[in-house]
Amino acid sequence: MIQINNFFNNPNIKITEKSGPFAVLEYVGDLSNSPYDAQNAYFMQKMNIRKRQVVCYLDSSSIKLQAGAMQWMAGAVEMQSGIKNVGGFLGNLVKGAVTGESAVKPIYSGTGYVVTEPTFRYLIAEDVASWGNGVVIDDGLFLAAEASVQEKIVSRTNVSSALLGGEGLFNLCLSGKGSVVLETPVPREELVEVVLQDDVMKIDGNMAIAWSKDLEFTVEKAAKSLIGSGLSGEGFVNVYRGTGKILMAPVMTGSVFPNVNGPEQKSVSSSHGIAKTLKNSIEL
């Protein structure tokens, strides 16, 4: 039997989202500050910059986390690397190199609790099945998922999408049944959800953080002619066609500054290579 006090019933902690075995916790205020940091902590709280964690409730079930994300666990919970052989490790290494994820995602199984490290990033929980045949996510957003969620790498439909779209050539696609938790650059309140039904959406910049696998993603000129695109100041745009959903972060850092065409690129991208992925996985 486990009794955890001053955590789930802590007035300074609130649950912002729930999906499947996951609950997203947010600290209302940062109470662990020195007098020298109090001023910064005060304004961070006012600007919605707060510590957040994910609690995973296991009931004879399994979840997988980004490597190094676990802070503590309680109960009859066991951790496995999720790697069955050398071939599996090399396959995951390649996946991590092109998606910004760790090469190893440990699997936690049993009955009890698993809690992730606190972060100042925003956390959202999604039901993978609600995205149809799968959801494609931007690089470095994966944090946790039920073990039933399947992972695979998807590539752009043409090379121009990689060279001009700012999204990279490969992305991680999650499919099947189960819930997933993503680390996003903006809070849920500022994410725009666009639902397409045999239609098209064009975005100037890499503001889409997740989209349905069924959507066709290409990069095209904003206008019919190259000269018209140049004169309009838009150039090329990311185009999503078909039926599905798109989660867009239009107020991501970089999109609100003058003379900046779209959000600034993240430090984690699909271009950092296999060597760096291996290094990060070992360090974690």
Image (cartoon, rainbow, N blue to C red):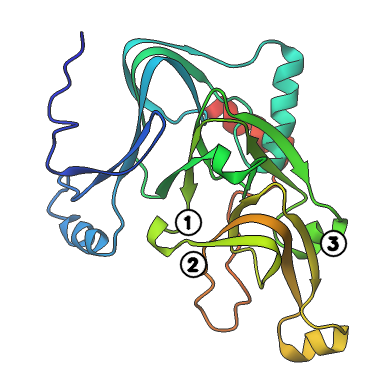
Residue 195 vs 80, above or below: the answer is below
Q: Position of residue 210 (x, y in %)?
A: 59, 52
Disc 1: which residue: 185
Tell me where residue 92 appears, x and y as whole percent.
69, 26
| Residue 97 lies in quadrant | top right
| Whether label 1 touches label 2, CB < 8 Å | yes
Q: Which amino acid lies under the numbered mark 2 shown in the image of this protein?
A: Thr
Q: Where in the figure is residue 146, as x and y percent of width and height?
A: 50, 27
Please name the residue that numbered disc 2 is placed on. 253
Identified at 17% across, 62% down, the residue is: 39
Identify residue type, mark 1: Pro
Position of residue 51 relative to residue 77, above or below, is: below
**Cα distance between the residues tagged 1 and 2:** 8 Å
Q: Which residue type does callout 3 highlight? A: Ser
Residue 98: x and y, percent? Answer: 72, 41
Labelled disc at residue 48:
none
> Which of label 3 and label 2 is nearer to you?
3
Q: Is residue 219 left or right of residue 24?
A: right
Label 3 element class = helix
Image-based side of 17 in relation to 101, left or right: left
Give whichever of discs 3 and 1 has the lower sequence position: 3
Q: Is residue 161 above or below residue 153?
A: below
- The residue that label 3 is drawn on is 160
Residue 244 found in image quarter: bottom right
